[in-house]
Amino acid sequence: MAENKKSCRDFAESLKSDSVIKIFVGEEIGQKPYLVARSILEGTAESFQKALQHAQNFGSGELDVLRFPKDDKVAWEVLLYWMLRGTLPAPGSLETEYRDHHGTDCYDGHLVRCWCLGDKYGIYAFQNEIMVQLILLVECNDLASSVLRDALENTAPGSKLRNICMEDLVVGLNEGSLEPEELDLFDGVVGFISAFRTAMLHSLRVQREMRREPGCMEDVYGW
């Protein structure tokens, strides 16, 4: 959320003259806009504050309109829910709703796109809630290779999502759910080699520490 410098009274007074912003997501012709109060947008992210101010100072007549033609519309639906309700849907219901409306595939990719949307606009609280959902998913299922590539292409080196994805990739290789040949999919992804090396070294250190634990060799190898 954007830093809130208003007092309760100032905020309440601003609602008396609040305007409604029309939000267009994607490039669909003739789409109906989402209608969101300006105060909610400005309270969500500083980037939205700046976009509205820029439209007011340098716009072309669309003072109460924001357009995001390159953004993912389904991810925006989740963000809008979170912005207006203050939380994500209850655990499990977000996945159920997505699968009901969009089929059974790519829910992991949906979460990745939501996280990247929050990252793009600096909405860190939203990112954190999405990350919890993603971690719960990764604990039970490996991320698809295409989803891993999408995540790596849209995250900065050292970001939480990239670290989670690299860890999942290494675990998949170690457990055999990911074939070494699938690493070719990541050719050309900036920073992949460095991130992969770091994740592999971390995995080796963890395994080495585990082997030092009493009884570990017996549990793993039957010695």
Image: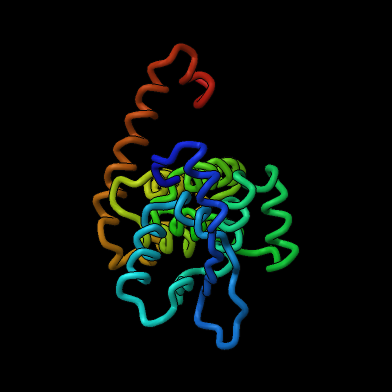
Farthest residue to the top: give it.
214
Percent of width and height locating residue 54: 33, 68
Judged left or right of residue 190, residue 106 is right
Query: In the displayed structure, would residue 14 be above or below residue 219?
Result: below
In the image, 12 versus 100, the foreground residue is 12
Farthest residue to the bottom: give it.
29
Total residue callouts: 0
In the image, 20 versus 30, the foreground residue is 20
Judged left or right of residue 43, residue 139 is right
- The reply to whether residue 219 is visible in this rendering is yes
Q: Residue at x 49, y 60 (%)?
A: 113
Q: Residue 100's image quarter?
A: bottom right
In the image, 156 versus 78, the foreground residue is 78
Percent of width and height locating residue 149: 41, 62
In the image, 8 versus 115, the foreground residue is 8
Way the structure is coloured = rainbow
- The reply to whether residue 174 is visible in this rendering is no
Percent of width and height locating residue 135: 54, 42
Percent of width and height locating residue 141: 59, 48
Q: Residue at x 72, y 49 (%)?
A: 93
Q: Residue at x 28, y 50 (%)?
A: 157
Work out which quarter of the rendered image holds the N terminus and state it.
top left
Q: Residue at x 53, y 63 (%)?
A: 19
